[in-house]
Image (cartoon, grey):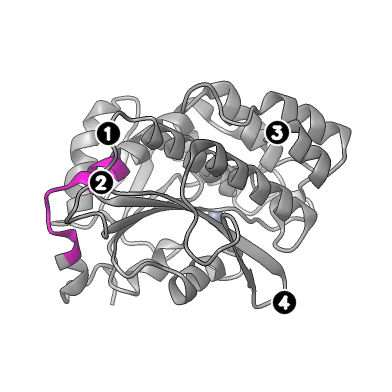
Amino acid sequence: MRPGACLASVAMAVVLSACTKVPECPESAFDADAMRSEVAYLASEELDGRVPGTEGDAAARALVSERFMCLGLTPLDGLDGFEQPFVDSLGRETANVLGYLPGADAELADDVVVLSAHLDHLGDGLLGANDNASGVSGLMAIAQALTERDEAPARTVLFAAFGSEESGTEGATAFLDELAPEDIVYSVNMDMIGSYASTGTVWALGALDGTPGRRIVETLGQDYPELDVGVGEPSDLSDNEVFCSEGIPYLFFWTEDTECYHAACDTADRIDHDEMIAIARLTGDTTWELANSGEDLRGIVQSDVNVCGVD
Ligand SMILES: [Zn+2]
């Protein structure tokens, strides 16, 4: 976030000091100091949980939009910038933040892998550092890592910070209903990636037996001996549910939080940063493999395979 943008959004000394710690684009993807500052800013008392329709929500969206801009991501056609405005079921005016990295393969570029994390939380003292400032920080780091690779991906990768997840995956629904490209072939979602120590496992939920996502996570997981990666369970607990209900397979990276889920103690000081960064790296590697996979991902979406894993 640029200091100038901070002045324009919320003129508070604490926010300004956070801004000086968060450069427009970190020098490197997965920069530990930058990610720590991002989570602290997104989960600050000033942003009060990024409640949809509030100044805290707008400031958080601005951070993501500015990162997408400095990375040179492409906005979707029909939008003014990276934001897709919508009004949620509680009448709150909010937005998704969306940008993509175009695929380079003539035959696969129309296939889209969506990497997402929800931006909102509950507020009124519930600040949502793990849920889901952690995922948003991971999303920005992965966007940087993928744009900095020497080659473009074969398939298009679309990065999405969804709004109003807590009130019922409303941002993801608005995206799929109103704006989504036709050929989304995989959903990769991060929600709560900052509480690894709570149970000592990161879950790749939805990595159902026989799916490309399962094969990729099991292979890449070996590059991360510091992480115990659980696979296979279905989950309808986050935005990935909206995708699988449309027949789109998903991977949902999540760490359980047995103490502070939707509680006032979900604060930035409790984030397990080293593991959070490792999980974000694994998620980014997985997204890259899906974007370049030689498997017929579009064929899976068009088949009758039950990609939700539940009836
Ligand atoms: Zn969440």
Mark 3–mark 2 Cα distance, whole angstroms, equals 31 Å
Do labels 3 and 1 touch, CB within 8 Å?
no
> Which residue is label 3 attached to?
2
- Of the numbered discs 3 and 4, the one sitting upstream in the chain is 3
> Which residue is label 2 attached to?
104
Asked if one can make out residue 279 in the rendered structure from this viewpoint, the answer is no
Mark 4–mark 1 Cα distance, whole angstroms, equals 43 Å
SS for tag 2? loop
**Mark 4 is on which residue type?**
Gly
Asked if one can make out residue 16 in the rendered structure from this viewpoint, the answer is yes
SS for tag 1? loop
Mark 3–mark 1 Cα distance, whole angstroms, equals 28 Å
Mark 1–mark 2 Cα distance, whole angstroms, equals 9 Å
User: Is the N terminus in the top left, top right, bottom left or bottom right quadrant?
Assistant: top right
Q: Which mark is residue 151?
A: 1
Of circles 3 and 4, the one toward us is 3
Of circles 4 and 2, the one toward us is 2
Q: Position of residue 242 (x, y in %)?
A: 42, 70
Mark 4–mark 2 Cα distance, whole angstroms, equals 40 Å
What is the quadrant of residue 171 in the picture? bottom right
User: Is the C terminus in the top left, top right, bottom left or bottom right quadrant?
Assistant: bottom left
- Seen in the picture, residue 137 relative to 95 is either above or below; the reply is above
> Which residue is label 4 attached to?
91
Q: Is mark 1 within 8 Å of ligand 1?
A: no
Residue for point 36% across, 41% down: 283
- Of the numbered discs 3 and 1, the one sitting upstream in the chain is 3
Q: Position of residue 310 (x, y in %)?
A: 29, 72
Residue bounds of the magenta highlight: 286-298
What is the quadrant of residue 285 in the picture? top left
**Mark 1 is on which residue type?**
Glu
